[in-house]
Image (spheres, rainbow, N blue to C red):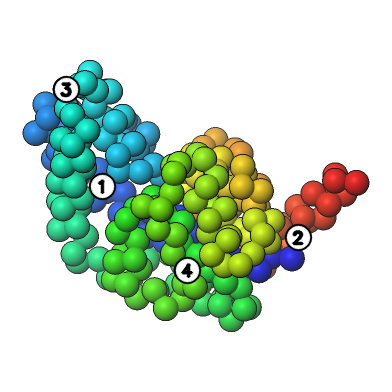
Amino acid sequence: MIKGFVFDLDGVLTDTAEYHYLAWQELGGKMGIAFDRVFNEQLKGISRMDSLERILKYGNKSRAYTEDEKIALANEKNEDYKKLITNISPADLLPGISELLKELKAADIQLALASASKNGPIILKRLGIENLFDTIVDPACLTHGKPDPEIFIKGAEQLGLRPDECVGVEDAEAGIEAINAAGMFSVGVGSKESMKAADLFVTDTSELNVRDILTAAANWSHKEQKGSF
């Protein structure tokens, strides 16, 4: 039985991807590394330091900076990003998300945030939904980033639930891989191709429906149990 939902943030609850892109582009320009939106897709769902490493590798500058300098660069990007998201408000919730969260809470389903973004708590507050979440996983306490399942396993633990009692919702391939590896029912938001590994997928957040998800998860759970005999 599903008792909890563990949500990613960017691309699921709100779309701050554009702000991340602009902030990384600004930093990339200072480092002499130009990249486009196609490359930027590789940065979705992964941590700030992992994103920086990918950008440096893309620009053939992996060894151009010390670890301390890389930390400073990542912090600089984050400061630019925080300035860009100052105006985020409840109006920036993606379609259908407000109704989805309220319906889940009305059904006594617990909610956790499992985002690689350290700004998750701030963004939830600006979106006006922080009171709906029972817990937020602190990415600073994690050893591994997505696609490792650690963040989703941690989300379930903080809710006091087993992974198989939870649904994970993601929009990135690395995130779906992490949910599946955690042993959760995975719901993907995106194209059929990019979400091909998800147990259930929708092309838009407005299509997320509590009843449909719980029905599909119940069937999945039944199959899992049958397969274990």
The residue that label 1 is drawn on is 20
The residue that label 2 is drawn on is 218
Please report the residue visible at 50 percent of the width from the left and 65 percent of the height from the top.
Answer: 112
Identify the mark at residue 119; answer none if there is no mark.
none
| Percent position of residue 9, x then y | 41, 57
- CB-based contact (under 8 Å), mark 3 and mark 2: no
Does 172 sit above or below residue 107?
above
First reached walking from the N terminus: tag 1 or tag 2: 1
Is residue 149 in view from this perspective?
yes
- CB-based contact (under 8 Å), mark 1 and mark 3: no
The residue that label 3 is drawn on is 64
Is residue 203 in view from this perspective?
no
Does 201 sit above or below residue 32?
below
Relative placement, left or right, of 43 versus 2 is: left
Relative placement, left or right, of 91 versus 138 is: left
User: Quick one: SS at disc 1?
Assistant: helix
How many residues crowd mark 1 within 10 Å: few (<14), some (14–19), many (20+)? Answer: many
The residue that label 4 is drawn on is 135
